[in-house]
Amino acid sequence: MGQRLSCAGSSYDRDFFTAVQAGHLETVRSAVDEDPSLLRRTTVYDRLSALHIAAANGHVEILSMLLEKYANPDIVNRHKQTPLMLAAIHGKIACVQKLLEAGANILMFDSINGRTCLHHAAYYGHSNCLQAILSAAPILVADSWGFARFVNVGDDNGATPLHLAARQRRPECVHILLDNGALVCVSTGGYGHPGSTPLHLAARGGSLDCVRELLAWGADRLQRDSSGQIPYVVALKRNHGACAALLNPSAAEPLVWPSPLKFISELDPDAKALLEAALMEANKEREKKILKGTKYLVLSPANSDEVVDDMSEASDSDLCSICFHQVCTIEVRDCGHQMCAHCTLSLCCHNKPNPTTLSVPSPSCPFCRCNISRLVVAKTKAADEGDNATNSMLRRSRRSRNFSGGSGSFKGLTLAIGSFGRMGRGSGRIMDSDDTVDKP
Ligand SMILES: [Zn+2]
Ligand SMILES: [Zn+2]
């Protein structure tokens, strides 16, 4: 780790930069007090300032001290990289936060590939740094730029941070970026031009988790890159068999989040966690079927806990009245009807959003047809008793997954949704403040 200091000029400078790299706070402080021009001095070859060296090595006390002494947070090195970029590359989260607090410019592009600090955090897979930059971005990005543009900015090769995270097998970063408005079908060739999508690059990298994440967000398996290849072919060529199986256009379609940009951001965080877990469960069930009989199906130890699941905790009145298998975990506002996370997802996902306009028909409650203004975690007696409602609900949701028995969860859900039209009005449950009542 660290930056090469070997080419530093005078021994005076060299000693100073060595002290910064080693994290000797007091030595650095007295040197700067004695000679403030050291703040602007750089190493000879890479042109690293003291701020760069402190940031890259995670010496947040030295970094803070230098910033207080009016060091310019946006000073660039030989490759036009800022201290913030180096902190993001090396995953030094405390330094990233400090620099963001100091108002570091997140809209700087380096001269190697024209990448921002967000590209670097995504490429190196430092999800905490990525999240910190994204959290600060709405304030730091000028109005003329806008948050969405920052998240989706391409480097010199047209790669967005999402492309890089997918290529480098960073599923957590892929997830965070999608959650913050990264466009899932963006092409490296620019909008509407042939190029690689994040799904092509995930196929090349061979990360099943990245492929799954992108598909759940509505990535298109049929989009072609500049050589006319779909992601399936890219995965095949690289011998990523499991990825190829999921990317095969003839394999069953995965369950997809309702609307990439809008719906998610308005979602109650606890309800969102439940829905995300349900979506991933449904898609993993689907994967198992696709990979069954191939050499790629690896049963994780986590699968063993579904066998011992039992429904003893859930009384009949807790059960979702759409599928009759899962416990109600999601409540529709304003009407108060409840259903399980799986059914909620299917309800919202059966209409795929239009990829060009990202518009999606607004979902309505299957019981009373009122517009869904908000989805929250359903309040039940069992959850109230628990110390952590969400965790308890997640456990309950997982516990009740033995419903997939014959027809399989995904198919079962589709059937359940298909039967909405035939269902009598009022079969949903409404939780009152103190009791459960059936709507007449
Ligand atoms: Zn259900
Ligand atoms: Zn309703």
Image (cartoon, rainbow, N blue to C red):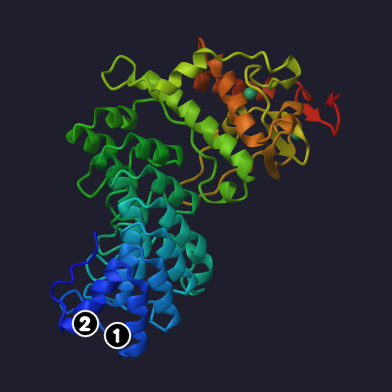
Q: Is residue 82 above or below residue 274?
A: below
164 vs 321: above or below: below
- Rendered residue at 42%/29% (across/down): 253
Amino acid on which disc 1 is placed: Leu
- Furthest toward the top, the residue is 406
- Coordinates of residue 395 in the picture (x, y in percent): 59, 27
194 and 209: which is toward the camera = 209
Residue at image position (53%, 36%) is 276
Say which of 357 and 219 sits in front: 219
Give the Cα separation between the discs numbered 1 and 2.
Answer: 8 Å
Indicate the position of residue 367 as horizontal and vertical percent values.
Answer: 74, 29
Mark 1 lies on a secondary structure that is helix
In terms of image quadrants, where is residue 293?
top left
Amino acid type at image mark 2? Asp
**Which residue carries the number 2 mark?**
13
Judged from the image, the secondary structure of the residue bearing numbered disc 2 is helix
Q: Residue at x 23, y 32 (%)?
A: 240
The quadrant of the picture occupied by the N terminus is: bottom left
Q: Quadrant of ligand 2?
A: top right
Judge whether 318 appears above or below 312 on screen.
Answer: below
Q: Position of residue 57 (x, y in %)?
A: 31, 63
Do we see residue 274 in this rendering?
yes
Whichever of callouts 1 and 2 sits on the residue coming sooner in the sequence is 2
Q: How many tags in the picture?
A: 2
For mark 1, does the 10 Å Cα neighbourhood hold few (<14), some (14 to 19), or many (20 or more) residues? some
Quarter in which the C terminus is drawn: top right
Residue 17 placement: quadrant: bottom left
Q: Position of residue 143 (x, y in %)?
A: 51, 73
Quarter location, residue 371: top right
Q: Which residue is mark 1?
A: 38
**Residue drawn at the location 59% of the way across and 19% of the way down:** 400
